[in-house]
Image: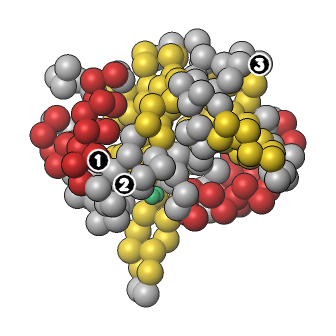
Amino acid sequence: MSEIKILIAGYARPVKGGYLASPSTVLIKDSGKFILVDPGANAKLLLQALKKEKLKPADIHIIFLTHYHPDHILNIRLFPKADIYDGNTIYRGDKEIFYNGKNIPGTTVKIIATPGHAHEHASLIVKTKEGIGAIAGDVFWWDDGQEPKMDKKSLLDLKDEFVKDKKALRQSRLKLLKMADYIIPGHGNKFQITSNK
Ligand SMILES: [Zn+2]
Ligand SMILES: [Zn+2]
């Protein structure tokens, strides 16, 4: 069983000449470890949120990156001592340690390969008091104010202007919708899965 807390609700707003975006940043506490998922790009918000949890950056053991888009990654510089994990490799300084990619070693947190938005994309499945949660990164995301309808079809058809492989993305969405009770999207608010099973 894990405890999770959304430290920052992911946002994405087109602005003149670009974007203002940082993803959902989630803190998982499992098996005595603090895991931070997608530290994002807003250093001020993240440090404030950690402080609220009475945590310092040095207290974070593991940083998990769902994929390699810089808005999900930039804040790793606040955690020079943490191990950086992706879906199958641990980065510790210049060491790259391959692992099974089924769960985060030493924890109950499951890893699911969810390619489509990005080829390397992986999501996390956590068992919590509130049910089974999927930390989905950009398998599901939307611009501020563009929240989709929450029926299965709308969620599967959700537009992704940065998609790399549409077919794979749809499969990944289907997988998470089947497994989870609720989903934390990359940008946007957590939502419950109701009649999709
Ligand atoms: Zn992305
Ligand atoms: Zn994103």
Crowding near pointer 2: few (<14 within 10 Å), some, many (20+)? many
Q: Is residue 136 visible?
A: yes
Q: Is residue 128 above or below residue 60?
A: above
- Residue at (27%, 51%) from the top-left corner? 147
Residue appearing at x 21%, y 38% in the figure: 150
Q: Mark 1: which secondary structure?
A: helix
Residue closest to the eye, 162 or 3: 162
Residue corresponding to mark 3: 32
Answer with the quarter of the image where residue 27 lies. Answer: top right
Q: Please determine whether, in this image, residue 37 is positioned above or below residue 130.
A: below
Report x, y in % for residue 141: 36, 52
Mark 2: which amino acid?
Answer: His
With 178 as the anchor, is 94 left or right in this view?
Answer: right
Tell me if label 2 and label 1 are in contact, CB under 8 Å: yes
For this rendering, which residue is in front, 163 or 45? 163
Q: What kind of residue is marked 3?
A: Gly
Q: Which is nearer the N-term, disc 2 or disc 1?
A: 2
Disc 3 from disc 2: Cα separation: 32 Å
* Location of mark 2 (residue): 117
Q: Residues within 10 Å of mark 1 (few under 14, many from 20)?
A: many
Q: Residue at 25% of width from left, 39% of height from top? A: 171
Residue name at image x 22 percent, y 49 percent: 167
**Earlier sequence position, callout 3 versus callout 2:** 3
Q: Which amino acid type is shown beneath numbered disc 1?
A: Leu
**Quarter of the rendering containing residue 145:** bottom left
Residues tagged 1 and 3 counted as in contact (Cβ below 8 A): no
Quick one: quadrant of the N terminus?
A: top right
- Element at badge 3? loop
Q: Measured from the top left, where is residue 197 in percent x and y?
A: 20, 20
Measuring from the top left, give residue 19's x and y in whole percent.
Answer: 45, 74
- The residue at which mark 1 appears reads as 169
